[in-house]
Structures are given as structure tokens and as C-alpha cells.
Amino acid sequence: MYTYDDVDQRLVEERVAQFRDQTRRYLAKDLSEDEFRPLRLQNGLYLQRYAPMLRVAIPYGLLSSRQLRTLAHIARTYDRGYGHFSTRQNLQFNWPRLEDVPEILAELAVVQMHAIQTSGNCIRNVTTDHFAGVARDEIVDSFVWCELIRQWSALNPEFAYLPRKFKIAVNGAAADRAATFAHDIGLHALKNGAGEVGFRVIAGGGMGRTPVIGHVIREFLPWRHLLTYLEAILRLYNRYGRRDNKYKARIKILVKELTPEAFREKVEAEWLQLADGPATLSEDDVRAIEARFERPPYQVLADATVAALGAFGTWMKRNVHPHKQPGYAAVSVSLKKTGVPPGDVTAAQMDAIAALADRYAFGELRVSHEQNLVFADVRQADLQDLWRELRALGLATPNIGLLTNIISCPGGDFCSLANAKSIPVAEAIQRRFDDLDYLHDIGELDLNLSGCMNSCGHHHVGHIGILGVDKHGEEWYQITIGGNQGLTRPGAPAALGQVIGPSFARDDVPGVIERLIEAYLARRESDDERFVDTVWRIGIEPFKEKVYGKRHQAQDHRRRQLAAA
Amino acid sequence: MASVIRHRTIVEDSWQPLEADPWLRVGESGLVPDFPVAGDLLVPLRLWQLRRDDLIARDGRLGLLIEGWDEPENFADALPRLQLVAIHVPQFADGRAYSLARILRQRHGYAGELRAFGDVLRDQLLYLSRCGFDSFALRDPGRAEESLAAFRELAAALRRPYAWQRAA
């Protein structure tokens, strides 16, 4: 866990005071709606369909039990008793009152939390691998680099009014668990021939209505230049990114319009002016940040042989992950129980999870971008006890990495941008695949669902992606297959899904997913070949045929749809 | 004369902005009227580019009006002769002026007065000043007094211990 120093603490307190005053002036009509908007957005506050939504920053997804208790308290006191973990590793409250938000931020500041830059056209919360610091394939502890970026980007005066939002992801392990190719900037730690640490810099990736896989802008950036290089990219984007059309304002469009080669040249030229400047990092700088991270005092243990049978065994297989420290394991707490909106947690659950974190996981937990929680440091000998307690709380669904571990945005039930609902669709699919044996037989599958083109549910990079679309006021769902969030295993790079054909009515979606699965099961070459591997091997045609029938049937489907539309 | 905020103090402004068009139209036809000999003259970039020598020959102080998207290379030669660079902010949420200010201060070493004018509001003053602006012509000059409080916000940021932290 990172602990603030006095200046960090003072800064969040001063930020609360600033926003309190801004809110007061807005309510007194001294500030217009337009003038207040970027100020409230940069403090995480949206004015939504039914009520404001407050997005609390959980920097790189790292959270202490004390902080989680405060979130539970806020959910009970100012909201309707629950919160929603988002794909940005943040927590969203859907029902606060605008007048209460300064007070909520003040309560957050007490436990070293804030909502700074969780929205708005600025550098957003930096995200990373939820196994940072414990993964066996670790190259660097990405938390340290994320914290450096957090401090550099939070309240950075130059980049508060960018053309559009800006998302940075850092991955510190061999496998890319941070979707670095789907971000405005992705940073992938690596070591050069001399064993020195640096970063592969990827830019211009992203989802939204124009999904793009990012381009490698620099193969190896020595770590000391990390911030000056970010500064160069951000400065170019701030100056030359499009401001005439918000749908063309993300950096991916600038990279595309310039071409990645020309963009790279400009970045390098700008960076030459900034390199070795004041934002250059020294070993002392990095060590000082590192020193503020408290690492768990591990016991010296040997890896245990845990007898994993029955339901516990199933959970062990899916929700328990290897750890670099012998005798320990990382545990995923599934927030994807059927019937509960993906990522939602009640205040009572938050308190209970905080208590479990204290007893089993050094008082610390992480939020994954798949909207689950992770206890990173659990003694293997404690796994069975922890499992029993999680199961009693409804948090031990053994579905991590499986089809029902659906990533979903809040959708039309809450969000004013959505074209269609997400949560009922996710639930209908979970109900269709409620047979655990079948689910486990299908194997690893990322199913991602977004209620609109903004792609908060990351549908473009789901092995199966579902996108809600509006057709003349009706909700329809377009399905893609073959997407992949990143190089999570060798030979399987980030990819965008391909649309299989015309979209479907909501009630048809679970049946379509079922037919896609049947097509896969009939054609996979082994149990190790995942759904997405099969799609890549044989292409999408066999899947289209299974869903739409032969070509004429597809046309017939389209005609019926047009008639309905 | 309008008031501006300069070095966090409200002052009456002596600068006289010149409209580009009448001067340029005459200038291009070859018949160029004289500039006011004395006084602080704030001129558009195009006028500087066309009448550089005449402007330098004047007695009064010289300032340049530029847009947030202007390229510093196009007026870098003027910087040593300028007492004021005034950057236009067309819309308060347009962030280009911030980067341009940093480039002028850090890369070109411009040390004179750097002013933001246009859609300049109280809640952007702090970040503008941290990027190098030291002078502000508010959209509503009548709100200058109440706006001074903005400079006292988030003061802890300046007390961060490490150079890289203060560089942001």
C-alpha cells in the first residue's frame, strides 16, 4: 500500500476546499453550467440520467481495508448502500446528491483518497496489472511507476484541458494484463540486453467508436526518461489533437492522421527538447516512492499441497492464482455472481471484504479491470477458510476467466450516454450458462458488453463482444468475435473483434451466444484451444453460418430486421 | 483603460491593442500610415511580420497578440524585442495556451509579461499561472478582485520535495 506524505495529504485537502468553493459558487449561480462542467468532471462528478454519479479514484486499483470501509460508509450515508467497480479500476456511486459531494470528498481525503481526474478531458486514473508485485512473470513492480505517473499527472497544469480524455496503462510483467495496446498510452516494462529497465511505449490505441490497436512508438525507453517522454507525447497531443469534433479528438486520430511514423518523429523531436529536464527521474526519486509502499511481511513458507476437491477445487482452479512468494497465492473475489450487476458490491459486502482483507491478506486488496477484487497475498494454508467465508458472502463464484465473468458497463439503467441496457443482458447470459460443468468445459472466454459506442465495457477486445445499438428507438445488440485485450499469453496479441453480422433483439442474445459456443465446441482441436484461438484458426465464417444459417438465411434475417425497423 | 491582473495585483492597463485589418490593408497597398510614436502598442502577429522594422523603430513598448495554436517558430525572432506576449484563449476549456506558454518560457527563455486574454475565467487562473502566465485580462474584468483567491489554491503542490514533482 502507498502511504501519502504530508504534502500529498495537504494537497487532497486543498483540492476538497477548492471544489467546495466551486460547488458553492455553482449553486449560487456564480458559475454557469458550462463553466462548472469541467471543474466537476475533474473531481469525478457526472450529472447522470437519474442522479449525479461520483467516480472515486482507486489509483492503479490498489485499496486498503480502511479505505474500503470508508467507501462502505459513504455508500450507506450518501448513496443507496452499494457501489460499482468500473473497468478503470475505480469505484462509482450512482446516487449521491450534488450538495453532498464536497463532504464525500472530504471523507475520502481522510483515508488518502480522492476523485481527482477520474473524468474530464485530462489524464485519467492510471491502470495496471492487478497482480502487480506478486506475479511470477514480474519484470518490475508496476505500482511504483504508476504512482510516479499519478503524482506527475494529478493536478498537472499543462494537461488539464486536453482535446479529450487520456488514459495511461502500465504493465510490469511478461504477460500484458493491463491491455496496454488499448490505451492512449500503454507502457510495457522490459529489460534491455544489459539488464536495464525501460519501457516499450505504445500510443494511439483505444476503443470507442473508432477502435484502434496502439502503435509502438518506442521499443525501449530508459526508465529515467519516463516522465519527460510522457510530457512530449501529451504536449504534442494538447497542441495538435483535434478540437473541432469530439469524436475525432482522441490521440488515436492524431496518430492516424499524421501516420504512426510521422507521429513518432514529432514525439522524438519534442522529447529531445525535454530530455534531461527537471522531470527526469533519478534513482533516489524512484527509491523514495518505492519506500512509501508498504510490502507485506511475508512468512518464510514452502508451497503447500492443497487438497482441492469438489466445489473448493473448482474455485481453486479458477479463482486462485500463482504467487512469486512460496506458500502464498493471489485470490480473485468474483463480483460476477448471476443476478448481481457485474462489479456491484453492497456496503455490507464491502465491510465484510475489508474484514477478510485484514485477516487473510495484510489489509490490502486490488480492483481488477475485469471488475473483480483481488486479495494479492493469501497464505496457501488459509485458502480453504477464506473460500468458506467468501462463499457465505456470495463472493466465491468460480468463474474468473470464464464466460460468465462478464465485463459490463452500467448501461442504460444508469448511464445517460447508453443506447441500450447492459445489466439485464449480462444476467440473461449468465442464467443461460449456469451449469458449472458446462461453463468450465467451455474454458477461458472473455465476454465483454457495452451499452454504447463509448465502449466502457471493452466489447471490442472481448473474445465475444456485445455492443448495444439504437435502431429507431429500439435496443439491438451487435456481436463481435475474435477480440483480445492483450498479450496475456504468448502468440495471442491484442486484437479487435469482427462483427459477425446484423444485430439482434435483446431476447435473442443468449441464444446467439449459445450457438457461437456450440460452433466452437464442435470445432476445437483440444481442450487447450480456447474459443478465441479457434476463431483465429478457422475464421469467423463457420460461426456466422452457425448463427445465421447459410448466406440466404442471413439475408432473410436482415430483411426481417429491416421490416421490424 | 481596462484593468488586468498582473503579478497577482489588479492594475490599470496601458497597452493599446491595434486591429490588424485597417493597417494591413493600407500596408499592402504600399501606403502605410505611421504608428503612434509613443505608447505601448499591442500588435497582431501578421502586422509584426509585415512591418517589423517600422515597429522596432518606434519609441513605445511593443507587445504581440497571438493565438494558442500559433507556432512559436513564427515569432521567436520577435521575442527579444517584446515586453508583452498576449495569448488569446478562444474558449476557456481550450488547453493549447498552456503548452504554448511553457514552450515560450522554458524553450525560448521568454521572460517578459505573458498575458492570457479572451475567455479567461477565475477557475483557470491557477493552472495558467503555473504554466508561465503572469498577466490576465479576464473575460469579465469586474470579477478581478474575487478572482485573486484562485492563486492561493492548491499551494501544497509547490512544496513537493522533488524536482520531478515540481516540474509538473
Image (cartoon, coloured by chain):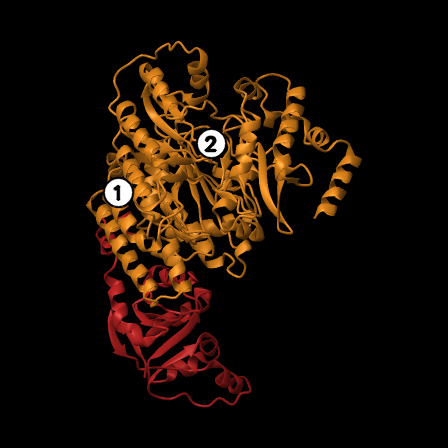
Chain colours: A orange, B red
Q: Please tell me how crowded label 1 is: few (under 14), some (14-19), or many (20+) other residues with Cα within 10 Å.
A: some
Q: Nearer the viewer, mark 2 or mark 1?
A: 1
Query: For the residue labelled by badge 1, is the local secondary structure a helix, a strand or a loop?
Result: loop
Image quadrant occupied by the N terminus of chain A: top left
Figure quadrant of residue A509: top right
In the image, residue A41 lies at what x, y percent?
Answer: 39, 54
Q: Is residue A280 visible?
A: no
What is the chain identity of the residue bearing mark 2? A
Q: Amino acid at mark 2?
A: Asp
Which residue is at the front of the view, A208 or A269?
A208
Question: Circle 1 is placed at which residue position?
Answer: A112
Relative to residue B27, is residue A194 depicted above or below? above
Q: Is residue A432 visible?
A: yes
Residue at x 48%, y 36% (from the top left corner): A179
Relative to residue A75, is residue B115 depicted above or below? below
Is residue B126 shown left or right of residue A49? left
Q: What's the mark number on residue A436?
A: none
Figure quadrant of residue B3: bottom left
Q: Amino acid at mark 1?
A: Gln
Which residue is at the front of the view, A32 or A348?
A348
In the image, residue A166 lies at what x, y percent?
Answer: 44, 49
Is residue A288 shown left or right of residue A448? left
Relative to residue B125, is residue A548 depicted above or below? above
Question: Circle 2 is placed at which residue position?
Answer: A176
